[in-house]
Amino acid sequence: MDDGMNDLKRLALLDPARGREPSATERARSEAFIERTIVGGVQAAPAHPARRRWLIAGAVAAVATGVVGAIAVPILIPGAAERAVASWTAMPTARTGDQVLPQATRCGESDVGGATKPTAADVLLAEQRGEATLLIMRKGETIVECLSADGDQFASMGLADGSATPALPPGVPADLQTMSSVGDGDDTWSNIVGLAGPQVTGVEVRLNSGAVLQASVKSGWWAAWWPGPEGGEVDALTVTVHTDGKATSYRPSDMA
């Protein structure tokens, strides 16, 4: 395989919708949006101060990804994201579904995956880093990820169709489902999510800068987020997967 194809493979990891086809409802909604745009039914947003533009940029991103059937729909609230970044810790604290039910309820109200009323049992993975709570949870027939800070949800992303965690290929202890970065300057933050087999006892993320953070692992998933742009860059980090006393390190491009 030539270098060009290798570069395309690495870049494909940055696509949160990799390998997913839109549902019939999503396709119809996207086609309707395109038709409204063509006939002039969608008006350009007026100019706003820089702080407001970040919020509008999130809304535009949601529309753009909807057109191509993507599953990542960021909902950006600058104040919440700033508080999350300021209070971030490299070591997360595990939370139970009961402990994060208020955050799960907010996640259930978001548009990603459709509005639902989740229970504690729907929470598959929950962690706390400072003021920020990361959830992976079921929403009807979808599995989603939500990030919130002190009650304000600032990002949500669809991870998988169906209420069951996807299966890994035989012999694969963990994979990478998606990684990305959002924001600008000091408020940029990154996110990484993958599947983890039952033999996985821990996952670490080492940035090329040398910083190390612990990912959370539960219910067949592993996930982490951190301040910085590395999630939106190609192979700017290393993922170390621990299985029964053995540690194996991967570049993201090796986990596709």
Image (cartoon, helix red, strand yellow):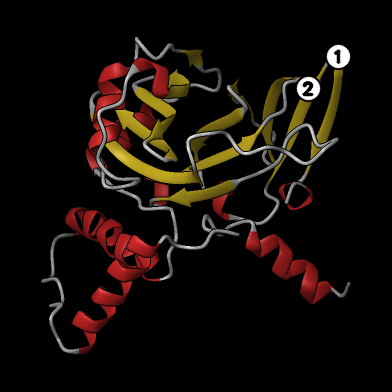
Relative depth, front residue between 167 and 126? 167
Could you tell me the amino acid type at mark 1? Gly
Query: Residue 159 — which label?
Result: none
Q: Is residue 17 above or below residue 98?
A: below
From the top left corner, tell me how far across and down residue 61 is, in percent.
34, 62
Is the C-beta separation of discs 1 and 2 under 8 Å?
Answer: yes
Residue annotated with mark 1: 245
From the top left corner, tell me how far across and down residue 152 is, in percent.
23, 31
Report the residue at 24% width, 30% height from top.
Answer: 106
Residue annotated with mark 2: 242
Q: Is residue 48 above or below residue 94?
A: below
Could you tell me the amino acid type at mark 2? His
From the top left corner, tell me how far across and down residue 44 is, in percent.
15, 77
Q: For residue 43, which quarter of the picture?
A: bottom left
From the top left corner, tell me how far across and down residue 39 is, in percent.
17, 89
Give the SS element for disc 2.
Answer: strand
Is 234 left or right of 181, judged from the image as shown? right
Report the residue at 25% width, 74% height from top.
Answer: 33
